[in-house]
Image (cartoon, rainbow, N blue to C red):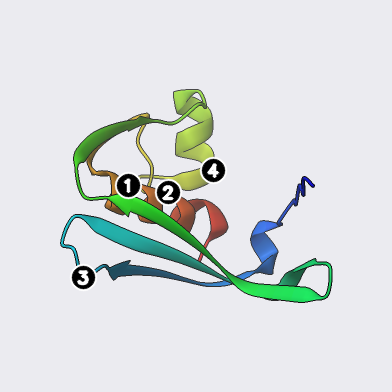
Amino acid sequence: QKYDYKIKYDDISRLFLLPKPDDVHMAFVIALDKPIRQGQQRYQYLVLQTNKDPDEVRVNLDEDTIKKEYGDDLQPVMRGSLSNLVAKTFKVIAKK
């Protein structure tokens, strides 16, 4: 069975970036105000595992839109560890 969910940015209550014991990965946790349901099970937290490797993220918006919507918080191309880039992007876009 396949489940597709759309989560609004307003439904995100908190964001966490936590180290994992292996010193290679990080856990990015999204806490939801309205838990998603899969059958009888409810999930209030979504966990994404990312690595700490250096990477590059390209924001798929034109530079004017980025400046207008997000100011200096987002750049068209950002470099750094993947876990930090994912966390920063979510934080800025979700305004948390």
Q: Which of marks 2 and 3 is in front?
A: 3
Rounded to the nearest angstrom, the CA distance separating label 4 from label 2 is 13 Å
Tell me the kind of residue under disc 2.
Thr
Pick the residue in front: 59 or 3: 3
Sequence-first disc among 4 and 3: 3
Give the quarter of the image for residue 25. Answer: bottom left
- Pointers 1 and 2 in contact (C-beta within 8 Å): yes
Secondary structure state at the residue bearing disc 3:
loop
Give the number of the disc on residue 89. Answer: 2
What type is the residue that disc 4 sits on? Answer: Glu
CA separation, marks 4 and 3?
Answer: 37 Å
How busy is the neighbourhood of tag 2: few (under 14 within 10 Å), some, or many (20 plus)?
Answer: some
The residue wearing badge 1 is: 85
Q: Which of 58 and 31 is in front in this view?
A: 31
- Sequence order check, earlier mark of 4 and 2: 4
Residue 70 visible to an observer of this rendering? yes
Badge 3 amino acid? Pro
Picture residue at 84% right of the left edge, 68% below the top: 39
Callout in the foreground (4, 2): 2
